[in-house]
């Protein structure tokens, strides 16, 4: 049987513009670059074909992607930040076009790249329900038919005629999900949307997706949540640096992915490509201060993460800094985000700056831990790396005892038998 | 996401006709067919734009009446009372109002459609649909406004005891020419706006300027004959003249060469705008 999605040699190129003055896309800049250049740019419009410009750099977000997805597949797509997952999804859903290669799609496609696409805050729940349904590809008659069921799923009956700007974030998300959950396309493309919402609701949605799969619909599921991929999908693939690995069972592919992550974490951070953000502030180095060689700490020691940042801004900018500690499999344990303390940090422009985060005597048990690091400016990420580096806690004791069980967090405790 | 009726069982029996191949050039052969398939989404987006326009406004729909009437009063006072410009034998307020109607349709549909892609950036980068329908939604809102303002004109004419003749039948034709010009300009600006946000500032400036160089507050009869053809390079001159002729009838003489020039120019703006838009819309999601 012919596959429902068949990608052959897909590639997507972006042009990165380096400019010392920030955004180069104002008319003034284009004008000063001579009127002729303006005409040329306006006529070409896209970034294609302007690679002769020395300020431009090509970047292939996807390259040589070959995939065959069969009808009824629940297909998991995993990969790290910047691996090209979102780009691939955008090509498959026709939001953007590939720069090379082609993809053949057979069947009605619905895309869920975010929750509540097209929701308008001024409109009521009822109005948004119809609007959102239409945007996701439902017909008017279909929405009317499913209306009651959607409202029930979302549990928002009482607020149907309230503008959604007065909704709590939970209600908003539930309504948006409910609409999405009632889509019945032949092919459903989903990007990480399950990352929001409370646990019970997530479960409800996963259940709904499982039902879709049983009905013979095809699902392409992009996620960081390896557990969800493993439980939901029957086939999976890793995307790495814009290229896909081989297709296999989720278990195999996840193992391959974790092994690869282990290898990459020891790469110098400046050379890593799996980062997201604008990159005007760049994390060039990461060190664990006060650790023994091999980034080893003792239980209860302060962990000091020292980052070397390079800012390409001309002036000092306010940045938000964040470090989080995770288990080797990626479960979050501790986050140290300057936002939590309402702090912002001044990062001088044009040179290297060192910043240190002291994590004060965390109660981490023996084991290996990974850290994610991020720098934000304004609301946007400048540089963000997951699994940026690792350290281990290899010795020491907690209140005189050593616990070899695989529980990462230690705590003082007390047992008491009631007389 | 072409909307086919069957949403139940989904075998691959009739999938052949729904097969689509996407390459670097998109799927160009499906362009117009797809536009038709997305007609329901078009209706929903237009409906949304109309709803949003009047939500949280105290006067709501009344704004569509207040704005043209205030403009009419101001222009009548300045051009009719202070400057004593000739009124072609019509009551001055009606002379002005017959021009405000097409001008307002032109300016609001140009401005709304010119900003439509950028103001729907979130949709553009998250869902696929033919980008033209967002623009169409914006134009529908302007048309709704126009319909209300036209009702005011009918009322004014009744008030002044003025009855139109046969030429009124030509009104839809002039309306169409005006729409060609404004949608054509809207297509250009919408596409340019995606990359160069400067055009957000260009549009209001252009429209403000245009209001004074177009014969809105006065009759184009006051332009010396030898300049009239050049004056008609502004496509709205022909449209406004046509409107006046259709509504006020024989009272306002019709200048054909100027109208033909306006018509040709409007069509050119529209065709070139549509081409440019189609050429650039495939990278909207990448640059927006």
Image (cartoon, grey):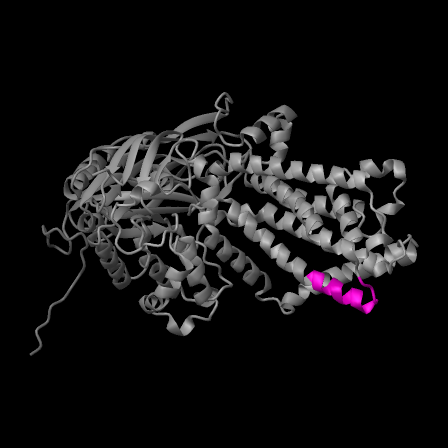
Where residue B239 appears, as percent x and y from the top left, is 74, 47
Question: What type of secondary structure mainly makes up the magenta span?
Answer: helix
Query: Which stretch is magenta?
Result: B149-163
The answer to whether residue A302 is seen in the rendering is no
Depicted B261 relative to depicted A124: above or below = above
Q: Quadrant of residue B8?
A: bottom left
- In this rendering, position of residue B82 left or right of residue B239: right
Where residue B126 appears, as percent x and y from the top left, is 42, 47
Does the magenta segment cover residue A54?
A: no
Q: Quadrant of residue B49?
A: bottom right
- In this rendering, position of residue B80 left or right of residue A119: right
Query: Hey, which residue is sitting farthest bottom in the picture?
Result: A419
Query: Hey, which residue is sitting farthest front in the picture?
Result: B166
**Residue drawn at x 39%, y 53% as measured from the top left:** A136
Does the magenta segment cover residue B160?
A: yes
Where residue B272 appears, as percent x and y from the top left, is 61, 35
**Residue drawn at x 87%, y 43% as measured from the top left:** B223
The answer to whether residue A132 is seen in the rendering is yes
Where residue A274 appears, as percent x and y from the top left, is 32, 36
Depicted B12 relative to depicted B99: above or below = above
The one of A306 and A215 positioned closer to us in this rendering = A215
The one of B131 and B15 positioned closer to us in this rendering = B15
Depicted A139 relative to depicted B233: above or below = below
The one of A393 and A4 positioned closer to us in this rendering = A4
């Amino acid at each position: 049987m012919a596959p429902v999605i068949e990608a052959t040699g897909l590639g997507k190129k972006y042009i990165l513009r380096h400019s010392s003055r920030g955004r180069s896309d104002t008319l003034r800049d284009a004008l000063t670059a001579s009127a002729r250049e303006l005409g040329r740019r306006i006529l070409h419009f896209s970034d294609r074909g302007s690679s002769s410009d020395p300020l431009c750099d090509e970047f292939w977000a996807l390259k040589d992607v070959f995939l065959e997805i069969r009808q009824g597949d629940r297909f998991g797509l995993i990969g790290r930040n910047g691996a090209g997952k979102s780009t691939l999804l955008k090509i498959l859903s026709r939001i953007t076009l590939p720069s090379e290669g082609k993809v053949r799609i057979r069947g009605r496609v619905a895309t869920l790249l975010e929750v509540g696409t097209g929701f308008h805050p001024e409109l009521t729940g009822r109005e948004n329900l119809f609007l959102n349904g239409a945007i996701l590809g439902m017909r008017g008659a279909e929405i009317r038919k499913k209306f009651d069921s959607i409202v029930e799923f979302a549990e928002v009956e009482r607020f149907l005629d309230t503008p959604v700007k007065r909704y709590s974030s939970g209600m908003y998300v539930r309504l948006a999900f409910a609409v999405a959950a009632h889509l019945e396309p032949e092919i459903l493309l989903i990007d990480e949307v399950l990352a929001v919402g409370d646990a019970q609701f997530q479960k409800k949605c996963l259940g709904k997706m499982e039902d879709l799969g049983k009905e013979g619909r095809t699902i392409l599921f992009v996620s960081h949540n390896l557990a969800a991929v493993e439980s939901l999908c029957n086939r999976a693939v890793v995307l790495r640096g814009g290229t896909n690995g081989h297709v296999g069972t989720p278990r195999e592919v996840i193992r391959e992915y974790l092994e690869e992550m282990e290898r990459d974490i020891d790469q110098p951070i400046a050379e890593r490509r799996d980062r997201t953000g604008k990159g005007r502030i760049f994390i060039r180095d990461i060190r664990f201060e006060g650790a023994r060689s091999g980034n080893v700490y003792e239980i209860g020691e302060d962990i000091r993460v020292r980052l070397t940042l390079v800012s390409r801004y001309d002036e000092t900018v306010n940045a938000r800094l964040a470090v989080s500690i995770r288990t080797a499999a990626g479960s979050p344990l501790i986050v140290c985000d300057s936002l939590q303390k309402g702090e912002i940090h001044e990062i001088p422009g044009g040179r290297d700056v060192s910043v240190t985060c002291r994590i004060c005597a965390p109660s981490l048990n023996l084991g290996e831990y990974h850290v994610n690091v991020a720098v934000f400016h304004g609301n946007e990420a400048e540089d963000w790396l997951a699994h940026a580096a690792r350290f281990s806690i290899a010795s020491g004791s907690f209140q005189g005892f050593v616990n070899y069980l695989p529980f990462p967090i230690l705590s003082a405790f007390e047992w008491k038998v009631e007389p | 996401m072409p909307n086919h009726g069957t949403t139940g069982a989904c075998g691959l029996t009739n999938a052949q006709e729904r097969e689509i191949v996407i390459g670097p050039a998109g799927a160009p052969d499906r362009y117009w067919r797809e536009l038709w398939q997305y007609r329901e989404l078009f209706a929903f987006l237009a409906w949304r734009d109309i709803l949003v326009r009047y939500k949280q406004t105290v006067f709501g729909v009344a704004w569509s009446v207040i704005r043209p009437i205030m403009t009419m009063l101001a222009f009548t006072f300045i051009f009719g009372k202070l400057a004593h410009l000739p009124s072609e034998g019509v009551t001055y307020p009606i002379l002005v109002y017959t021009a405000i109607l097409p001008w307002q349709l032109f300016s609001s549909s140009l401005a709304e459609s010119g900003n439509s892609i950028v103001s729907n950036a979130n949709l553009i980068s998250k869902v696929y649909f033919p980008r033209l329908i967002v623009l169409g939604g914006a134009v529908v809102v302007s048309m709704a406004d126009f319909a209300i303002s036209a009702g005011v004109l009918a009322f004014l004419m009744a008030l002044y005891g003025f009855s139109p003749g046969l030429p009124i039948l030509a009104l839809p034709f002039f309306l169409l020419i005006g729409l060609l010009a404004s949608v054509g300009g809207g297509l250009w600006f919408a596409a340019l706006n995606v990359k160069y946000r400067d055009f957000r500032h260009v549009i209001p400036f252009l429209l403000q300027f245009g209001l004074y160089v177009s014969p809105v507050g006065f009759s184009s009869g006051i332009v010396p004959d030898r300049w009239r053809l050049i004056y008609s390079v502004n496509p709205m001159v022909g449209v406004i003249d046509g409107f006046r002729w259709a509504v006020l009838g024989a009272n306002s003489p019709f200048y054909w060469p100027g109208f033909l020039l306006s018509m040709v120019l409007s069509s050119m703006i529209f065709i070139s705008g549509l081409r440019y838009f189609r050429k650039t819309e495939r990278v909207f999601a990448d640059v927006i």
